[in-house]
Amino acid sequence: MKAGIVVFPGTNRERDMAIALRTVTGRAPAMIWHRETDLPDLDLVVLAGGFSYGDYLRCGAMAAHAPIMAAIRRFAEAGGHVLGVCNGFQILTETGLLPGALLRNAALRFLSQDCHLRVERNDTPFTRHWATGDVFRTPMAHGDGNYIADADTLKALEGEGRVAFRYARPDGRVDPGDRLSNPNGSQNAIAGVLSPNLRICGMMPHPEDLVDPLMGGEDGKPLFEGLVEALVR
């Protein structure tokens, strides 16, 4: 699998993501500067976490207009696979490649802590190494992770099975009003969503930070292993 990571001014999780991808692929991903206008030959484009353009205006709003995003849109429209994590998820919503928006956390403060996610379906490239209903631990680190969408969008996401992950208790129970298990207040406890063709995934927590026992666990590794299995050529 050939992967590339887009780097914007303010991106700070590209090395974490590169470690995760190199761990499962055995090869270093390409680093793609935001001013590029074309992508190399890739199977997967990753928008990593951080604070692109200092989060001025809105998180991801300026990055959405970077030169590279036109190439990513073409890549996605041609059926390419895209993963956006944290700020990358925010950028995908700002570009319209994924629906909804990420607002300030319900407590109006930055959250840096572990959370638990429940896998809502396992028939996508991003979730195929889990079983539906599996729960895994993953770190979160964001100030604007409160997922919100209008009623029609939420109905479509739920009806079409496009919620990939939900914030949950360790035993898998989901309670959107529980600030312990859904600390940023996301609607329907949504932590990650999918595009209609299931080839674009955005999520707020950071599975790339748990891919090795030295990091404290391998809970996030199945996401990357599933991508390799689905996309290797």
Image (tube, rainbow, N blue to C red):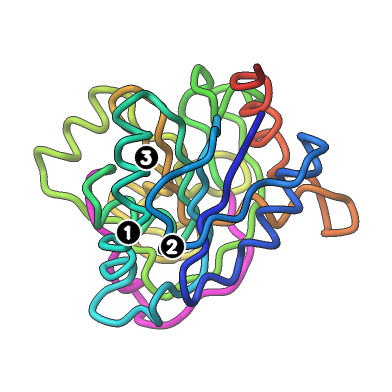
Residue 135 at x, y = what percent? 61, 38
Q: Residue 193 bears which disc, if any?
A: 3
Q: Residue at x 17, y 33 (%)?
A: 155
Label 1: state its secondary structure: loop
- Check if mark 3's residue and mark 1's residue have beta carbons within 8 Å: no
Q: First in sequence: mark 3 or mark 2?
A: 2
Where is mark 2, residue-wise?
A: 34
Quadrant containing the N terminus is: top right
Q: First in sequence: mark 3 or mark 1?
A: 1
Residue 102 at x, y = what percent? 30, 62
Label 1 to label 2, Cα distance in Å?
Answer: 6 Å
For residue 89, which quarter of the picture?
A: bottom left
- Check if mark 1's residue and mark 2's residue have beta carbons within 8 Å: yes
Label 3: state its secondary structure: strand
The residue range painted magenta reads 99-116
Amino acid of disc 1: Pro
Quadrant containing the C terminus is: top right
Q: Nearer the viewer, mark 3 or mark 2?
A: 2
- Check if mark 3's residue and mark 2's residue have beta carbons within 8 Å: no
Amino acid of disc 3: Val
Label 3 to label 2, Cα distance in Å?
Answer: 24 Å
- Estimate how packed mark 1 is, as few (under 14), some (14 to 19) or many (20 or more) residues with alpha carbons within 10 Å: some
Where is mark 1, residue-wise?
A: 67
Amino acid of disc 2: His
